[in-house]
Image (spheres, rainbow, N blue to C red):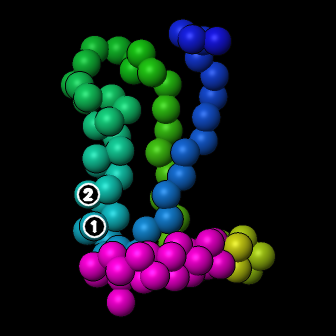
Amino acid sequence: MSGERTIWQVSAVIEATEEQKDTALEAIARALCPDEDHPGHCPVPWTLMACRLNDLDPEERASWQEDFDEERRRARESAVPGTD
């Protein structure tokens, strides 16, 4: 299957200020398309979306929050700085 392309969804849930969120989005965009000024369409089709946790419907919000809380708990148990 090497060399075959398929569609993937990659997601990240972060706790950040709006500025930090924008910085993260820009970093992801540059990883997907290093030359934002290339002519024509991007050779790697991609789209990037962001939404606030509070903008999700209650069921999806609860699922995201559960996942985020679990990752935060694991980070604390691993004594990762900045997770208190």
Residue 42 in view here: yes
* x and y, in percent, of residue 11 in the image: 54, 52
Q: Secondary structure at mark 1?
A: helix
* x and y, in percent, of residue 49 in the image: 50, 51
Q: Say which of 45 and 10 sits in front.
A: 10
- Count the labels in the image: 2
In the image, the segment drawn in magenta is 64-84
Task: Give the residue at x 39% y 20%.
Answer: 42
Task: Name the residue beneath numbered marker 2.
Answer: 23
* x and y, in percent, of residue 4 in the image: 60, 12
Q: Main secondary structure of the magenta part?
A: helix
Asked if the residue at tag 2 contacts the one at tag 1, i.e. Cβ–Cβ closer than 8 Å, the answer is: yes
Where is residue 80, by image quadrant? Answer: bottom left
Task: Give the residue at x 34% y 40%.
Answer: 29
- Above or below: residue 54 compared with residue 18: below
* Quadrant occupied by the N terminus: top right
Q: Secondary structure at mark 2?
A: helix
Please, what is the three-letter code of the amino acid marked with disc 2? Thr
| Residue 5 left/right relative to 81 | right
Q: Which mark is residue 74?
A: none
Q: Residue furthest right?
A: 59
* x and y, in percent, of residue 30 in the image: 28, 37
Magenta region includes residue 29: no
Q: Say which of 5 and 60 sits in front.
A: 5
Task: Name the residue beneath numbered marker 1.
Answer: 20
